Amino acid sequence: MENEFYKDYKERVMPALQQQHGYKNVHQIPKVEKVVINTSVGSQADVKQALDDAKTELALITGQRAAETRAKKSISNFKLRKDQAIGAKVTLRGERMYEFLERLIKAALPRIRDFRGVSPRGFDGHGNYTLGVSDQSIFPEVELDKIKRNIGFDVTIVTTARTNAEAKSLLSEMGMPFSDRAKKLATASPSEGGPAGQAQAA
């Protein structure tokens, strides 16, 4: 059965992007290629246990086994040795990727306390977007009473877009709540839903 989020991308998002940017060929329309979830535990005192906890939490959130990431070089000030396991990451593609994005956008982000949108400044100039998540408790799959430690991680959304503007259009159409978009909506219709300041980003 086809993922609903992907179905929405094909039936609604693709035509909207084609109209906005005037793509002549459907293959020019940007799409999400992969999503990488990455965390580092190198600064924890008990790195081995922290790494096990991080891998367990990432697997729970993504539905896929996490791979270890290792230090590329030794840094004595940080007590790091080359090839020491210091973090974990998961790379999602296909159906699992769309399922994760749907949960992130529709369920996890709105659970952040005083959430006012994600920063529009997380683009890298090549159509990819990274946002930081301060702890795993925003995901519904995580049982709060079983959290051993807060694990923050970065979510990098890799797209085929050529520019930041195209990538932002893609993610906005897919429902990513950018904070500057919330500002525009609030400024355009302050009468709908109270004072304009309520929807503005911090």
Image (spheres, grey):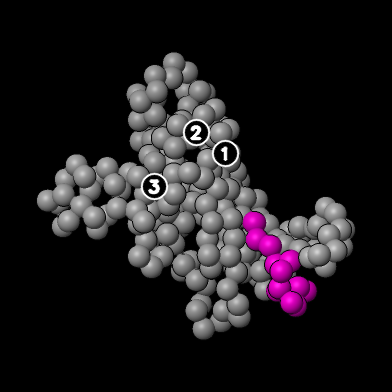
Is residue 73 in view from this perspective? yes
Above or below — where is 108 with respect to 32? Answer: below
Indicate the position of residue 127 as horizontal and vertical percent values: 54, 34
Pointer 2: what residue? 164
Q: Which residue is drawn at 44% across and 16% down?
A: 24
Indicate the position of residue 54 as horizontal and vertical percent values: 66, 69
The furthest residue to the left: 191
Above or below — where is 69 with respect to 161? Answer: below
Alpha carbon separation for disc pair 1 and 3: 16 Å
Pointer 1: what residue? 124
Q: Which residue is drawn at 43% across and 19% down?
A: 23
Disc 3 marks a residue whose amino acid type is Phe
Which badge, 1 or 3, is on the more N-terminal residue? Answer: 1
Toward the viewer: 79 or 53?
79
Toward the viewer: 124 or 63?
124
Which badge, 2 or 1, is on the more N-terminal residue? Answer: 1
Above or below — where is 69 with respect to 53? Answer: above
Per the rendered image, the range of residues in magenta is 38-50
Indicate the position of residue 163 as horizontal and vertical percent values: 51, 29
Indicate the position of residue 5 as horizontal and vertical percent values: 43, 47
Pointer 3: what residue? 178
Q: Do the residues labelled 2 and 1 touch (CB within 8 Å)?
A: yes
Is residue 63 in view from this perspective? no
Element under label 1? Answer: loop
Disc 2 marks a residue whose amino acid type is Asn
